[in-house]
Amino acid sequence: MMRGGNREMRRMMDKMGLDMKEVPNVQEVIIKTDKKEIIISKPSVTEMKAQDNSIFTVTADDYEEMELEVPIFSDDDIQLVSQQAGVDEEKAKNALEEAKGDLARAILLLTSG
């Protein structure tokens, strides 16, 4: 490894307009998808700023993954079911939950019967 490697790395980052710093006292990071949540307790988080963007690096020893019982539906899915079945978005969302995200089944639930 080079002598003064950290200092040289810092200089290189400064020349490229990158600013990197540790985010202090982070208790938890939660990553949510439409089907699960990833919960990271007491991670080390670093933010790297470059022009108008930020890149976050999350490092942890352990994390917990939880499947969501009720998936989160996109606004597009809710609008599609709402328009196709001729109902408000709340009814469309409830039908999607009952159909476990199956768009066609949700529309059928709302239009038949």
Image (spheres, rainbow, N blue to C red):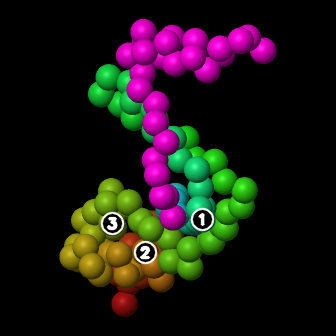
Residue 50 percent location from the top left of the image: 38, 24
Q: Which mark is residue 96?
A: 2
Q: Secondary structure at mark 3?
A: helix
Residue at 66%, 54% (x, y): give it. 60
* Residue at image coords 72%, 56%: 61
Magenta part of the protein: which range? 1-27
Write down the residue under mark 3: 78
In depth, the one of 60 and 112 nearer the eye is 60
Q: Is residue 92 left or right of residue 15?
A: left
Residue shown at 39% from the left, 34% from the top: 54
Residue 37 visible here = yes
Indicate the amino acid at tag 2. Answer: Leu
Q: Is residue 59 magenta?
A: no
Q: Amino acid at mark 3?
A: Ile
**Residue 104, position as x, y percentages in the image:** 46, 67
Magenta stretch contains residue 7: yes
The reply to whether dot 1 and dot 2 touch (C-beta < 8 Å) is no
Secondary structure of residue under mark 1: strand
Disc nearer the start of the sequence (1/3): 1
Residue at image mark 1: 41
Q: How many marks?
A: 3
* Label 2–label 3 contact, CB within 8 A: yes
Residue visible at 25% across and 65% down in the picture: 83
Q: Which residue is at the front of the view, 34 or 112?
A: 34
Q: Which mark is residue 108?
A: none
Q: Is residue 94 found left or right of 68 in the rendered image?
A: left
Q: Nearer the viewer, residue 112 or 48?
A: 48
* Side of 59 where 23 appears, left or right: left
Q: Is residue 106 above or below residue 2?
A: below
